[in-house]
Amino acid sequence: MAGTPTHTVTNQPPPLVGYDLFTADRALAEAVGRHTTPDVLDEVRAELTALGRAAGSAQLQEWAAQADGQPPRLRTHDRYGHRIDEVEFHPAWHRLLGKGVSAGLTGAWTRPAGHVRRAAGFLLWTQVEAGTCCPLSMTHAAVPALRADSALAAEWEPRLTSTVYDRALRAPGEKPGALFGMALTEKQGGSDVRANTTEARPLAEAGTYLLTGHKWFCSAPMSDAFLVLAGAPGGLTCFLVPRVLPDGSRNVFLIQRLKDKLGNRANASAEIEFAGTWARRVGEEGNGVRTVIGMVAATRLDCAVGSAGLMRQAVAQAVHHCTHREAFGGKLADKPLMRNVLADLALESEAATALALRLAAACDDGGERERAFLRLAVPAAKYWITKRCAPVAVEAAECLGGNGYVEESGLPRLVRESPLNSVWEGAGNVQALDVLRVLSREPDALDACLTEIGRAHGADHRLDRAVKDLFTELADLEGMEGRARRLVERLALVLQGSLLVRHAPPEVADAFCASRLGGDHGASFGTLPAGLDLRPVVERARPV
């Protein structure tokens, strides 16, 4: 049926589709170039360009909408009454997860520049559909924990770093690739995992146990195996729980329900029961937290990287819309007030990307100095970047006006997703307390962070003054717990400022230091001070 005379569509931006998310993100592409050695840089750029083109395609955007619009369903029993405890996903979710695995998003540990290229890819992939990022992150992060047991690592690591996605639940030895989940927290303890009540009873075979207990949050319950904390005779211990046993029979893994979440709806999170569940010990009895901490550190970094990706997509959508939309006699992006908003959002996005990729580069370095840097910088970055994600997503949606409140725009999905990483792997207070713990016990970590910040000394007077203020905070750690968030925020901001002053265009660094470090900024976005050159800041963030 022909449209009516009133149905002429004008002044609507074209869809942001069919473009390369990697090369269109100048801050990300430059960070990859900065942190990748020349001998593999061309290979890494080609890999990320291919992933960026896939991520920006109409096909994958359609799959993402399908996966989010039709969340997973729990099937506890088959038609005959047998307990099966399976989670059914829309086919689009499997397609997306398969592409993420094939792109190497679980294989950082065995490739040159592995962490930088994987972090950049993870940042891109989060912009497609963050619901597939949880199993990718868990699988990637399980590797350092499994290395506490050389036999387990030799058995499982090739499957976890594989680029083959095999969705079937079958004996691990028959699978070319496998995914890992995690089940640490319990309803009575939450982040206080030492309050866990799940029990592990040793069996006759060395290193094997039967678990009994309840886990309040199990990430990615359709995975092939899980890292779990439980109380063994020697104390809290880490265990590997496979879904399918070596003989092909199902392990006891009772999924009680799937969580009905605000966002991240394409991904399944579950409550599970262990009732005589077979498990293998990872590490020594009583060393559960120490064993699993490598996994937690890796997933915390992914929280920061993922939030940087969500912010990037929100800013890209906002700048794209305002570049094409006209109002009050001109393009929205050219209006001084809207330009201020867009530039402010772009600063937040670029600062997050710069810090996230710097941390990934430290993982690749592997030296003791960089490991010390990570112990303090990761919880600080996880705290701050994830906190900034939600206000960025909401403000970006507002840039689209009423269109940004409509599901078809994609912005509501970003808004719903945006608080997740702040909660996952330890909420804000947990990160702040971890920073205090590191400061009190590991002076080499603070020294490494201050050395990193000091590389920009003298380049901007506002950064130098902010560093002095940070020193003042650090000089008085007595009674610091109540001020911990303030300290962590300052640490993250001066880390970001140091990176931008050294590596970003002058207009970006100037605006960041004036607003975030110089104090000339309001309580909302769009309050950057007068006198800044904001046009190139917005243009730099435009996805072209």
Image (cartoon, rainbow, N blue to C red):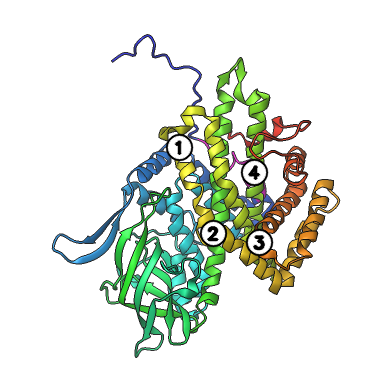
Is mark 2 in CB contact (under 8 Å) with mark 4?
no
Residue 359 position (above or below residue 266)? below
**50 or 408, which lies in front?**
408
Amino acid beneath label 4: Glu
Amino acid beneath label 3: Gly
Q: Residue at x 58, y 50 (%)?
A: 387
Label 2 and label 4: CA atoms lie apart by 20 Å
Helix, strand or loop at disc 2? loop
Disc nearer the start of the sequence (3/4): 4
Helix, strand or loop at disc 4? helix
Q: Residue at x 75, y 32 (%)?
A: 533
| Part of the protein shown in magenta | 19-31
**395 or 459, which lies in front?**
395
The residue indicated by pointer 2 is 427
The residue indicated by pointer 1 is 410
Is mark 3 in CB contact (under 8 Å) with mark 4?
no
Is mark 4 in CB contact (under 8 Å) with mark 1?
no
Helix, strand or loop at disc 1? loop
